[in-house]
Image (cartoon, helix red, strand yellow):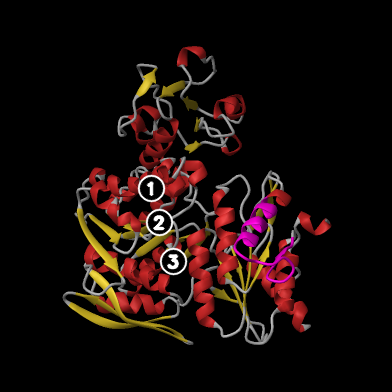
């Protein structure tokens, strides 16, 4: 007996995806959804995705061999001759997203869902909002690029930073509903938006941190990248009606260049936040940075509260404002509840995270991997020390090449010493990447061997940085943050900058500590 709620025919009857062929969708039972043939188990439907380097249609035989009950793709159905039903659609990624939502019975429709997008600060803002909701007594979950938080359960969402694919994302949301959660915070990357991974999530509130230079290689330029981010705000008008009738709201950054563009992308209510008093719906006043944290007053036209945050830097004040604006104007929480949540957040993994083994200088690991984020990190580092700032970072291979020069230029101007090193070179030549960065550093006035170094092995780069640090200096390793691997060729090697920093410091201080993680560059 077929479970009609999980039959292919029943699922398609609930989603806005046109099947070009066959005319009659087969009534076959479905046990799950897979887009990777290696993840197919008996009864799953396999959806063939076409990417920049792989065509999923080539893996249909493997999927069928593993027990796929049906296949969905974009190639003409009449040209396919498989022993299981094959459905032709216009957009297989859209089909994957909508089918995943239907398979898990549209969990986003049963909660209030807040989406957070932007170039930098997404994870911090998402985590701040999650803490505000939890501190206010709301049953909230979160899916960030670091982890999924479902009640007391914490799930790793992957090696590298991007939104989970639709089947995983919908499964996380379904688990939240099953756990009795009423609110979900979802970090939405540009890839996640452009590749329809968050389609069907049913967002009620959309928040933007900023839109600066990143992923321009993938999106074809800044306009394409900005348009991908805008999809989150455009989706608000298409969210299904929910029984509990949450408010639809766009939360915009008045201080960012995106403010000239995003207001016209959605017809729902909008509020703004910013650092300039009186020009926005929520702002900060009396901002000051002390050794024990950041202090400011959180202000709206109806009132204000004093706030102390352990997060450092002006950009984190902006992140606090973004989260608080969503909570207060979108979810009806009070300023006092927003304050409590902000103050309850002690740290965000890999974001300006201090590593302290008793060394006489400051050591920090931060995720800054864009020109804007690196600028913010180094400016903040300067505020945290009266000594030198020593920066260690690289730039990824097979990604936007322009930012290599931009980041090297930024560090040459803002850091006292720059150590250029490996950061996911993939199949590109690390020598070539470092040469591009070195050229930009020298153009900005950096002197080889004195104010900048090129060290191929990231572990050795961090070692050299801590060895040259004097009492009162600050060493900051940027670009990897919380990430757990680094890609050389097509192989992901286990890697954590925080472990590497602890290993280097332990060696320096002659203490017991972790071993320096291995990378192939260690072999020369």
| Region of the chain picked out in magenta, as a range | 433-455
Residue found at x 55% / y 74%: 353
- Helix, strand or loop at label 3? It is helix
- Residue 226: mark: 1
Query: Disc 2 and disc 3: Cα gap in Å?
Result: 11 Å
- Helix, strand or loop at label 2? It is loop
Which callout, 2 or 3, points at the residue further toward the start of the chain? 2
Which callout, 1 or 3, points at the residue further toward the start of the chain? 3
Front residue of 272/431: it is: 431
Query: Disc 1 and disc 3: Cα gap in Å?
Result: 20 Å
The vertical placement of 415 against 491, above or below, is below
- Residue 118: mark: 2
Residue found at x 39% / y 24%: 27
- Residue 124: mark: 3
- Mark 3 surroundings: few (<14), some (14-19) or many (≥20) residues within 10 A: many
Q: Is residue 65 left or right of residue 145?
A: right
Instruction: Tell me whether circle 1 and circle 3 mark residues in contact (CB < 8 Å).
Output: no
Q: Quadrant of residue 392?
A: bottom right
Residue found at x 38% / y 73%: 317
- Helix, strand or loop at label 1? It is helix
């Amino acid at each position: 007996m077929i479970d009609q709620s999980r039959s292919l025919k029943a699922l398609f009857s609930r989603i806005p995806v046109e099947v070009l062929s066959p005319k009659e969708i087969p009534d076959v039972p479905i046990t799950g959804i897979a887009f990777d043939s290696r993840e197919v188990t008996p009864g799953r439907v396999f959806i063939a995705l076409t990417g920049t380097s792989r065509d999923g249609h080539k893996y249909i035989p493997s999927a069928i061999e593993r027990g796929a009950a049906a296949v969905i793709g974009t190639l003409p159905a009449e040209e396919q001759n498989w022993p299981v039903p094959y459905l032709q659609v216009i957009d297989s990624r859209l089909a994957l997203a909508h089918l995943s939502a239907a398979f898990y019975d549209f969990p986003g429709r049963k909660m209030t869902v807040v989406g957070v997008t932007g170039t930098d600060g997404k994870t911090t803002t998402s985590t701040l909002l999650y803490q505000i909701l939890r501190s206010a007594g709301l049953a909230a979950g979160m899916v960030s690029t670091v982890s999924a938080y479902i009640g007391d359960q914490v799930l790793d969402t992957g090696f590298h930073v991007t939104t989970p694919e639709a089947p995983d994302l919908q499964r996380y949301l379904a688990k939240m509903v099953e756990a009795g959660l009423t609110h979900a915070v979802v970090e939405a990357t540009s890839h996640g938006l452009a590749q329809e991974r968050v389609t069907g999530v049913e967002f009620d509130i959309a928040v933007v941190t900023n839109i600066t230079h990143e992923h321009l290689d993938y999106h074809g330029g800044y306009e394409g990248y900005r348009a991908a981010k805008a999809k989150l705000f455009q989706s608000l008008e298409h969210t299904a009606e929910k029984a509990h009738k949450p408010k639809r709201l766009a939360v915009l950054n008045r201080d960012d260049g995106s403010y000239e563009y995003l207001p016209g992308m959605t017809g729902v209510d909008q509020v703004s936040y910013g650092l300039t008093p009186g020009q926005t719906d929520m702002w900060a006043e009396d901002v000051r940075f002390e050794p024990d944290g950041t202090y400011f007053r959180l202000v709206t036209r109806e009132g204000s509260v004093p706030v102390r945050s352990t997060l450092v830097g002006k950009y984190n004040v902006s992140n606090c404002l973004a989260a608080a604006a969503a909570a207060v104007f979108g979810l009806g929480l009070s300023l006092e509840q927003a304050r409590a949540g902000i103050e309850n957040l002690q740290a965000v993994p890999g974001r300006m995270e201090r590593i302290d083994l008793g060394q006489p200088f400051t050591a920090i690991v931060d995720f800054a991997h864009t020109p804007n984020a690196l600028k913010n990190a180094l400016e903040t580092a300067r505020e945290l020390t009266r000594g030198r700032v020593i920066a260690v970072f690289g730039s990824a291979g097979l990604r936007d090449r322009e930012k290599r020069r931009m980041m090297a230029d930024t560090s040459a101007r803002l850091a006292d010493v720059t150590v250029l090193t490996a950061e996911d070179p993939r199949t590109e030549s690390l020598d070539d990447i470092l040469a591009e960065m070195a050229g930009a550093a020298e153009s900005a006035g950096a002197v080889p061997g004195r104010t900048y170094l090129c060290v191929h092995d990231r572990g050795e780069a961090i070692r050299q940085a801590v060895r040259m640090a004097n009492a009162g200096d600050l060493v900051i390793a940027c670009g990897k943050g919380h990430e757990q691997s680094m890609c050389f060729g097509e192989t992901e090697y286990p890697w954590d900058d925080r472990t590497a920093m602890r290993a280097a410091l332990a060696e320096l201080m002659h203490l017991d500590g972790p071993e320096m993680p291995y990378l192939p560059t260690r072999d020369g």
